Amino acid sequence: MAEQGGWSFADDRGRVAEAERRPSRVLAYVQAGATLWDLGVRSWSVFGSGHDGADIDPAKAGELPPDEVVCLGAGTALDVDALLRGAPDLVVAVSYGGGQVYGLDPDTAKHLEEHVPVVVIDVGPSRTLAGTSDRFAELARSLGAAVPSHAAEEREAARGRLRDAAQGGGVRVMALSPADQDQAYVARPALWPELAALHELGVGLVDPPPGPGINWHTAPWAEVAALAPRVLLTDVRVNAAPLSRLRAQPDWAALLDAGTLVVPWNPEPLCSAHAHARFLSTVADALDSVRGE
């Protein structure tokens, strides 16, 4: 909230970030920065995770304009001095549980907070898809954005459309991240809020067998093909193997020959109601498409 020139916001760690005035020079993890941009908050700079390179991953960037938003780097390139370059007056980060800042070394995150207010939003499985978008909307409003109420209505309409498209079942949907020519990482739906939302709405998601991976099950491509998905939500982030490299992979080719529909998927999605509505509508389109063949 902002009152009498002051600003404060209670984040998902239970900590209250405070400033003498409403922040206007925001540094954010790229997923959070893209989400805030979608909500009307103009981030000044972003940083990535250890999976990213020196530039902004286009799959995560949303509508962030690369000529206006500075990318400070990712992984070991990030230290407190690098993050404070440009004098941000607020840092917005994400967490997948436990309050740990994703993408930053714990000591770096700790020392960063000694210099600038930090808000951490939980985007992990403990929160629903709608809950995550509502939380970011709350933060955006505190930063002065006029978040339109119709975005939540759009999200609810998309939920209704997907529920209708999923009626009757029969369409097997799998989410995965291509690792290389030999294997893929198959997502465990309950651990991803956007996939859990699909399951809630009746989408027939493939749940991989139990194993050591928490979020992902590592599977050879032959196993993926044997699971016979009709719709394949496929990771398009820069750390995933590009689909063009899989053309000579026989099991991948068999999936395509069998009519499997490949749908681009970003496992670190924008967390706005509008973006969630787009995702739900895309899945509904895919279900309608394979049923109409």
Image (tube, grey):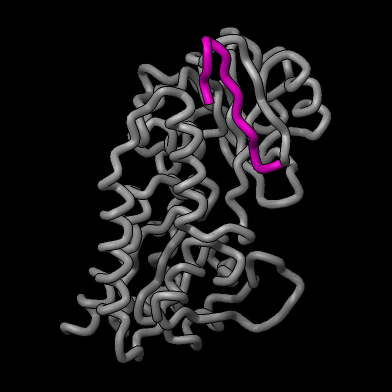
**Number of marks in the rendered image:** 0
| Residue 80 horizontal side relative to residue 174, left or right | right
| Residue 25 horizontal side relative to residue 156, left or right | right
Q: Nearer the viewer, residue 42 or 145?
A: 145
Magenta run includes residue 3: yes
Q: Which residues are magenta?
A: 1-13
Q: x%, y% of residue 65?
A: 34, 25
Residue located farthest toward the front when viewing the structure as drawn: 4
Q: Nearer the viewer, residue 92 or 230?
A: 92
Tell me if residue 110 comes above or below residue 199 in the rendering.
above
Q: x%, y% of residue 135?
A: 51, 44
Snapshot quadrant of residue 35: top left
Q: x%, y% of residue 177?
A: 52, 62
Residue located farthest toward the right when viewing the structure as drawn: 107
Tell me if residue 58 comes above or below residue 67 in the rendering.
below
- Residue 122 showing in the rendered view: yes
Q: Residue at x 66, y 25 (%)?
A: 17
Snapshot quadrant of residue 209: bottom right
Q: x%, y% of residue 26?
A: 52, 20
Q: Residue at x 33, y 63 (%)?
A: 280
- Residue 183 showing in the rendered view: no
Look at the image and tell me in which quarter the C terminus lies.
bottom left
